[in-house]
Amino acid sequence: MIVIQVSDFSGPFEVVRDSKNDESLQSFIDLWEKPTIYRLLGQTLGDLFIADLSSGVPQTDRFKSIFNAFLLPNHHESKGMKPLLLACISYQRDCKRQIKDSQSGYQQASTENSSIISSRGAMRFGESKFNEYVNTAKAIQYKCQCEGETYPEFLGDTDFFIVKYGSLI
């Protein structure tokens, strides 16, 4: 665990919990959490941030100030790093879960007793959650850039966190 645990997926990020879903969700956390931190902060600052964590919470003031929610005077608002990571992981999960690999090739998921949202619908659902947190990523990166003496190692990918639009728009 870096910051996110399976049990954090509640509220707007709520998922159905059972052993199979928990295992799948953990694999998405393992796959996307660290690269998202690196994209947000850069590898060096990301590694320093991860090393500063204790039970998923930063210990030093410089990392607490970008981890927790904040509002800067110029209206750059962060909802906090944990919800941002949840949104990014949820986006990847929502977009990729609707397609299944089978012996005859890729297939859309199916069920007998209910309707499954289309792959395009799932993508839009994932995008809507991700898009809500783009400003949080931008605010964290802006804070790191403006406070260069506190975050001299910052090399985050400022082009990664952009609003995503599916083919419906």
Image (tube, rainbow, N blue to C red):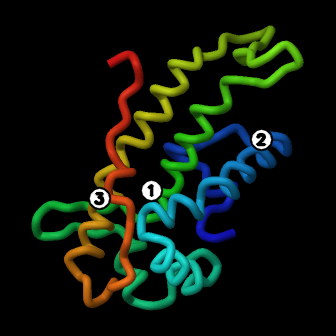
| Mark 3 lies on residue | 138
Q: How crowded is mark 2: few (under 14 residues within 10 Å), some or many (20 or more)?
A: few
Q: Mark 1 points at which residue?
A: 84
Apparent side of residue 33 relative to residue 30 in the rendered image (left or right): left
- The residue type indicated by label 2 comes to Asn
| Res 66 → quadrant | bottom left
Crowdedness of circle 1 by 10 Å Cα count: few (<14), some, many (20+)? many
Looking at marks 3 and 1 on the same chain, the residue that comes earlier in the sequence is marked by: 1
Q: Residue at x 77, y 41 (%)?
A: 21
Label 3 sits on what residue type?
Lys
Q: Quadrant of residue 113?
A: top right
Residue at point 33% right, 45% down? 162
Three-letter code for the amino acid on which mark 1 is drawn? Leu
Residue at image position (11%, 70%) is: 73
User: Label 3 crowding class (10 Å Cα cut-off): few <14, some 14-19, many 20+?
Assistant: many
Q: Position of residue 64 (x, y in %)?
A: 41, 81
Residue that mark 2 sits on: 21
Q: Distance between the residues labelled 1 and 2?
A: 21 Å
Q: Outermost residue toward the right?
A: 103
